[in-house]
Amino acid sequence: MNKLMLRGFAQRKVRALLTGIAIVLGVALMAGTYILTDTIDHAFAEVFGSAYKDKAVVVTPRETLGHNSGSQTYPIREATLARVRAVPGVAAASPSISTRATLLTASGKRISGTSPTLVNALQPPRFEAFTAAQGHLPNAEDEVAIDQATAKREHLHLGQRLVIAGSAPARSYILSAITRFAGSESLGGATVALVLPAQAQYIAGEPGEYDGINVAADSGVTPEQLAARVRAALPATLIVRTGAQEAANQTSELEEKLGFLRTFLLVFAYVALVVGAFIIFNTFSITVAQRTREFGLLRTLGASRGQLMRSVVEEGLLLGVAGSAVGLFAGIGLAPALDGLFKAFGADLPDNGTVLETRTVIVSLGVGIVITMLAGFFPALRATRVPPMAAMREGVQIPPRELTESVVLRRAGLLAVVFVLVGFALGEGVAPILFVIFAVYVMVLLAGMARGGGPRHYRVIPALGRAIGLLVSWRGITGRLARENSIRQPGRTLVTALALTVGLGLVAFISVLAAGTKATIDQAVSRSFAGSLIVQNTRSGEGGIPGGIAPALRSIPGVGSVTAIAFTKGRVRDLSQPGAPVIAEKSPVTAIEPESFGAMYKVEWEHGSAATLSSLGQDGAILSKKFASAHHLQVGQRLLVLTASGHQVTLTVRGIIKEEAIGLFSNLTISRALARTAFGQREDGVDFISYAAGANGTHVHDSIDALLHASFPQAHAQTAAQYTQEQSSKVNQLLLLVYVLLALSVLVSLFGIVNTLVLSIYERTHELGMMRAIGASRRQIRQMIRYESLITGLIGGVLGLVIGVVGAVLVSTLALSGSGYVLSIPVGTLAILLIAAALAGLLAAQLPARRAAKLDVLGALTSE
C-alpha cells in the first residue's frame, strides 16, 4: 500500500504542488514570525550584554507600579551618588542619564527616522561602550556624537550643526564624532546621541539629577558582593543589580514589550493556515471521490478499510511534511521581508543575523503537519464507507453523512473549545480572527442543515450561485453553463469559496471598524473641542510634549487661553471597602488644568457640572462612567492612589463623566498641578489653544508655528480639521499594513480555486470532450471555466463581506456600546473588495481554462 500511495502521489504532481503551496505559505509566515522576533530578541540581548559588560553594579530608581508602567519616577541626586562612592569595594561610580528627544538638522529636517533619538550622557572611558570611529567624543558643551548607522543613513558629516529638542527648548550642537557601539554601527538600530552630562540633564529637563549609577568594583570584589553592599547603603526606593542582572532584566522587559508583535503576526499565519486547511480538505474530498472505483478495486483485491484509510492519511502526512519543511525554509527568507515591511511602515526593528530556534522548527513543522492531516482525515474516512462491489460500478458516489442537529452542536462546541484555547494562547488580539472563522464554520453547518442532509443539499450556494450567475448568463451558452456547473456540487463550491471568504471577511471586518474609528474621532472632535488649535508631538510614538510649551504659548500675542493635558498612571485602592482593596493596578490617569479646560472642551456629565472641574484642587478626582460602574464607585467616595514615585494620595470623587470616544478622559482625572507634585509627571500629552477675541487666527497660528519651530520642533499646532485628518491617516496606515498581511491568505485561496478547477477539469474530461465534439470552440471552453471561477470568487466575496460587516456591527453594538463609537459602513471599500474577489476568481482561472481548452477531443471522449 505504501508503494501504491507513493506511486499515486508521484502521478498527481500538479495537485500535490498546488495543495502544498497552501500549507507552505502559512507555515512560512509562522516560521518567519518566530525567526524575526527571535532575531530581534537576540540582537537586543547582545546589545544589553555589551552595554553592561564593564559595569559590576547598576543602580536605578524603583518603579512602584512595576516595570513597563509608563509612569515617571523620581531621579537620583548627588547625595545618593556620594553614598554609593563611599561603599567599600567601589572603585568608581558614574551617574548615567538617558532620555528621549528629537534630532534635527539645522534646516529642521528630522533625523531620528522611525524612532525617537536616545540621548545619553557621556560616561568615563571605563564605562562608555561607544567609541569614536571618526572625530572625537564630546568635550565641550556644544558638541554631540552620533552613531555610525544613523550618520550613514542620514549622510551626516563631522562639523555639521544638529538640533536636539527634549523637555527643554531646543539647542544646537556641532557633530564632533561618529561612533560605534561595542564594534557595531549602532545600539540595536537605535539612533543615539552622546553629549556631556550637563547637556543631557538640560535636554531631559532634570538639572542636577540622574537616571542611574554605574559602579565598578575593586579588584577581588565580585559583582554579587558589591551589589549586596550597595543595596545595604541605599533606600528601598532604589534597585541595585549586577551588570549581568540588569542586562537580563532589560532583555526580559523588551521581549515582553515585543510580545504583541509576535502575536500580531501569528494571527495572520493562522489565518493563512486555516485557509490552507479549507483547500486541503476540498482537494482530498475531490480526489477521494475521483478514486472511488480505485478504492473499490483495492477492497475487492483484499485491502482492508484500515489500509485504505492509512494510505490516504499517509498521503496527507507526506504532503504535510514536505509542505511544512519547504515552508520552514521559506520562512527563513520571509523574516527579512517582514522586517523590511515594518520598516516601510515606520517600525525600525533591529536585527543581527538570523536566529533559528529549535522551538521554531518544532512548532512550524508540527502545526503544518497536524493541520494537513486533520484536513485530509475526514475525506479519508469517507473513502472507507463505500462497499467494494458498489464502488466498482461506474458513476458511484460516496454517500454524504447526515448533518443532524446533534452533529452540528457537537462540531460547533468542539470548535468553540479549540478557539478558546487558541485565544488564550495567542492573546486578545485574535478575537476578530476567531469570530470570522467560527462564523464561516457555522455558516457551513447551517447551510448543510438547511434540508437536513449533506453537501448535495446545500441551499445557500445554489441560490447565491444562480443570483450571481446572472452576471454572466447574458454572455450566452457559456455563461449559462458556467452558472449551472458552479452549483452542480454546492458543497465543493462552498468549501472552495470559503477559502476566499476567510480573508475577505477579516478585511471587511477591520475595514468597517476602521471606518467607524475615523468617524468617531471626527464626531468627537467636532462636538467636544471648542478651542482653536491642538498642539501635540509630531509623532505619537515619541511620547508627549515638553511641559514648557504651554507657558511659552501664553506669551504669544493673540493667544487667549492655553490648557495643558497630561497623562500618567497610578495604583488605585477603594477606601470605602474593608482593607482598601486594589481595584486598578496600573490605572491610567488624566491631568487637566481645571481653570481653563472647561472653556476649551465640552464635558458630558453623568454626575457633575462645569463647577465640578473647579473643585478638583489637590485632592479631587473625576471618574469615567465605565470605571465607576465597574467598581461601584459614587460621588463622595475616597480613593487611595499610589504613584510611580512612591507617593500615596487620597482623592475624593467629585464627579462622573460619560464615556467619550477619543479617550481624553482616563479612569481618573485629576489636576495637572497634583500630577506634577505627587506623580512626578513632567511632560504634557497635548495642549489646547483658543484665540483671543478679535485676533487674526492666521497670524496667531503663524506665530505659534514660529515658536515651536525655533524652540520645540518636536511639536506642531493643528486645527481640529487637520487633527482629525492626521488621525485618519494613521488609521489608514495601520489598515494598509493589515491588508498587506491578509493578502497572503487571499493568495492561498487563489491556489485553492486553481486546485479545485484543475481537479474539476480532470473529473469532467469526458464531458468537455463531448462539448468540443458537438461544436464548442476552445475559446468557449476557456470562457466557461473563467466564468465558473468568477462565480466562485464572487460567492466567497459576498459571504466574506456579509460575515465581516455583521461581525463588525455586532462588535460595535455589544462591545463598544456606550463608548461613543460611531458605526460607519465604508460602502466604497466594500465594493472594491467585491471587485477584488471577482478579479481573484478570474486570475485563478487562467491556468485551468487554458488546460481545459487544450484537451484532446478523441482522448477526452474515450476517457471514463
Image: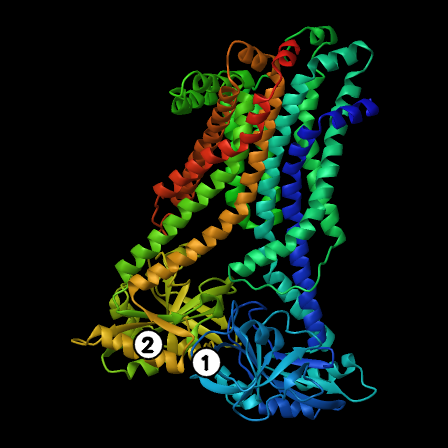
Q: Could you tell me which secondary element the residue under label 1 belongs to? A: loop
Q: Residue at horizontal 52%, vertical 48%?
A: 740
Camera-side residue: 691 or 756? Answer: 756
- The quadrant of the image that shows the C terminus is top right
Camera-side residue: 229 or 683? Answer: 683
Q: Nearer the viewer, mark 2 or mark 1?
A: 2
Camera-side residue: 536 or 608? Answer: 536
Q: Could you tell me which secondary element the residue under label 2 belongs to? A: helix
Query: Where is residue 124 drawn, in percent x and y?
Result: 67, 89
Local packing at callout 1 (Cα closer than 10 Å; few below 14, some 14-19, many 20+) is many
Q: Quadrant for residue 366, please give it.
A: top right
Point out which mark residue 383 bears.
none
Total numbered labels: 2
Decide if residue 399 is in sight here.
no
Q: Which residue is mark 1?
A: 167
Q: Which residue is mark 2?
A: 705
Question: Height in image: 700 above or below 857?
Answer: below
Farthest residue to the left: give it.
694
Question: Height in image: 12 above or below 55?
Answer: above
Query: What amino acid is found at the position of numbered circle 1 in the picture?
Result: Ser
The reply, left or right, for residue 437 in relation to residue 621 is: right
Question: Height in image: 247 above or below 772?
Answer: below
Query: What amino acid is found at the position of numbered circle 2 in the picture?
Result: Asp
Q: Quadrant for residue 415, please give it.
A: top right
Query: Where is residue 639 drawn, in percent x and y?
Result: 44, 67
